[in-house]
Amino acid sequence: MQTLPLSDALFTATQQKVLGLLYGKPDQSFYANEIARWAQVGKGSLMRELDRLHQAGILTLNRQGNQTHYQANPACPIYSELLGIVRKTFGIGEQLQAALAPVADRLVWAFVYGSIAKGSDHAGSDIDLMLIGENLGYGDVVERLLPVEERLGRRINPTIYTPADWLAKTAAGNSFVQRVSEQDKINLIGGPPPEEPAHEQ
Amino acid sequence: MSSKDNLENLARSGGLKAEPPDRKECEGLLRSAIDRLKDAHNPALSFASRFDLAYNAAHALALTALRRQGYRSDKRYLVFQCLVHTLDVGKAQVRLFALCHERRNLAEYEGYMDVDEALLADLIAATDALLPQVRQAMSTTK
């Protein structure tokens, strides 16, 4: 049982915030004040971090007028690896896990599919979220996801099925469910529902 | 920023068009919403029809609220988003309508309609809750 998030073992809180924003939206540049406001960290420690990441070639720096813009650097030798780490950990995965934690006991399987999971997303791509569980309502789920949408600046499109729905649609060869099954996923909680409903002992 | 300012800003950026409120038009929209919402509750109808009816009832109600303020828009998504300014509707509720709008577009333009009873139930409940708010607002209009 993992008790420590991957991201906390690998990166400081400030690094997570900076990398989460800049490698979460690699085709956008951000200026320091914008990053400070978003990350809610002091300007001093943020500037030190941005400077280090720039010196290591993880970020590029570009002056526009009197603003200094930072952006993920595609020429960095570990650019794609960092994108993957951010995508699978604190970028989107951990934020969704945290938002869904209060309903985790009702979830059998939760995962992200679509362009984000495939890594073919752009800054405006929606997050396609599949939630398979019992007694989950759209109203409740949407409310829990709103703060994550705002933080990530992306829309989240949840689809909610019961395990029985998912199995029935799979068995019926439903085109959407089939397409989702075959796609890359970012696993958030649990795993595929068992074929047969578990019998009570 | 007040709701009025927010609507004015949206009109300035071209999302909304200013047009004086029209009592008859609002009453017509409301009547159509009531009829459709009633039929959306009918379990004898197909899922696709019920979803369509409930979605269009919600849109008619949201548009009524927007027309009352003296605006209109042919962007359905925006009409729903304006609910936070035109009525006392929370962001989560608006997000639910927006999600239904996206599902409706998938069905309408890509031919894919997912039978999602949970979403239909929540859409109908949210539209049921919207109706008295619009009625209340209409009754206070001169």
Image: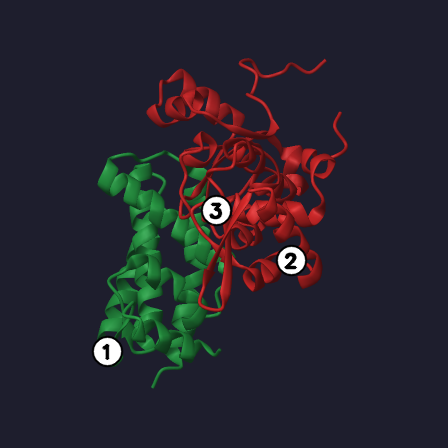
Indicate the secondary structure of the residue bearing disc 2.
Answer: helix
Which residue is painted at 47% across and 20% down in the image? A167
Give the residue type at disc 3: Lys
| Residue A25's disc number | 3
In three-dimensional space, the C-alpha distance between marks 3 and 1, rounded to whole angstroms, equals 39 Å
Q: Residue at x 46, y 49 (%)?
A: A154
* C-alpha separation, residue under disc 2 versus residue under disc 1: 50 Å
Query: In which image quadrant can residue B85 be found?
Result: bottom left
Give the chain of mark 3: A
- Would you say A175 lies left or right of A17 here? left
* Left or right: A201 in relation to B4: right
Tell which subunit mark 1 falls on.
B
Q: Amino acid at mark 1?
A: Glu
Determine which residue is flagged by label 2.
Answer: A47
Which of the two marks, 2 or 1, is nearer to us in this view? 2
Please give the letter of the chain rendered in green: B
User: In the rendered view of the protein, which quadrant contains the C terminus of chain B?
Assistant: bottom left
Above or below, comparing residue A187 to residue B53 in the picture:
above
Q: Earlier in the sequence, mark 2 or mark 3?
A: 3
The percent position of residue A72, horizontal first and vertical second, equals: 50, 45
- Chain appearing in red on the rendered image: A
Left or right side of A2 for A158: left
- Of all residues, the one furthest to the front in this rendering is A55
